[in-house]
Image (spheres, rainbow, N blue to C red):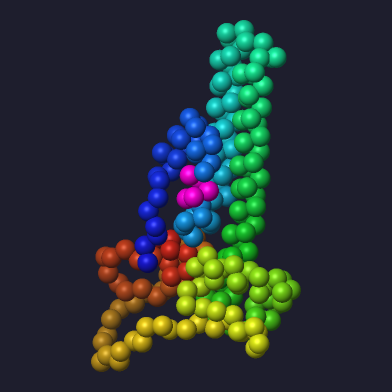
Amino acid sequence: MKPNKSISWPLLILVIICLPPLGIFLLVSKYSSNRSLLFASSLILKLLAAVTIIYGVAVFVYLYNFEVGFDSPLMLALLGFVVVAAAFYNSGIKAKKESDKYKLYIEAVANRSLRDVREIAEFTADTYQQALLVLGNMITIGYFKRAFIDYDNGLLVFVDTVPVPEEPAVNIAHKTITCNSCGAHASILHDNLAHFCEYCDSPLP
């Protein structure tokens, strides 16, 4: 499945620089609407922090050259750039931790075919309750499609909602690749079509 289209990164960065409140709103919207973004968001947020600092320094130099006093509201407003940059950087660190956690769960579920929540918890070094919470979040976000948690038996269950009709065996060449974003293994056809990761919707190489 192809990821949802949203505002491009160059335009988003321009809006963040010119209109920070609107830019941050669009950033949150882009982040929440695209699963593949999570695995790249750490670097993106840190770059935004650097851009914000550079922009703030440029404005400071401009105001200083025009002999604007440090007690001026314009100078005090520059503190906002520091706050925004710190928020971007902190969000980048949190996003890195979250993406690493999700990659570990995708490795357990997609690549190692673990379905017992206790085994998944052991593999990810989480408690049973933490594993239930993370799996529930990933199902809600859409990483594990057609899945639900059987709390009575402690199992992650996948359900095929669309029956697949039986077809005669055809010798079709496949290749197995690894998603560069989430690390899931995927078997795709040898063709010239675009393929996307089943779990994070990132383009497959």
Task: From the viewer's perspective, tell me whether residue 76 is left or right of residue 202.
Answer: right
Name the magenta segment's main secondary structure. Answer: helix
Task: From the viewer's perspective, tell me whether residue 147 is left or right of residue 119.
Answer: left
> In the rendering, at what x and y percent does residue 26 appear?
48, 44
Q: Place residue 136 in its image quadrant.
A: bottom right
Q: Residue at x 54, y 68 (%)?
A: 140
Locate the C terminus and report the quarter of the image it occupies: bottom left
The single residue placed furthest to the right in the displayed view is: 127
Locate the N terminus and report the quarter of the image it occupies: bottom left
Up/down of 82 relative to 12, above or below: above
> In the rendering, at what x and y percent does residue 3 appear?
40, 60
Q: Is residue 148 visible?
A: yes
> In the rendering, at what x and y percent does residue 10 appear?
42, 39
Q: Residue at x 36, y 62 (%)?
A: 2
> In the rendering, at what x and y percent does residue 128 appear?
72, 77
Does the stretch in magenta take in 92?
no
Q: Residue at x 40, y 45 (%)?
A: 8
Up/down of 155 relative to 56, above or below: below
Task: From the viewer's perspective, tell me whether residue 78 is left or right of residue 167.
Answer: right
Q: Residue at x 72, y 74 (%)?
A: 129
Task: From the viewer's perspective, tell me whether residue 14 is left or right of residue 64.
Answer: left
Up/down of 192 relative to 20, above or below: below
Residue placed most toward the observer, 130 or 44: 130
Q: Is residue 183 visible?
A: no
Boundaries of the magenta span: 26-30
Residue placed most toward the observer, 136 or 1: 136
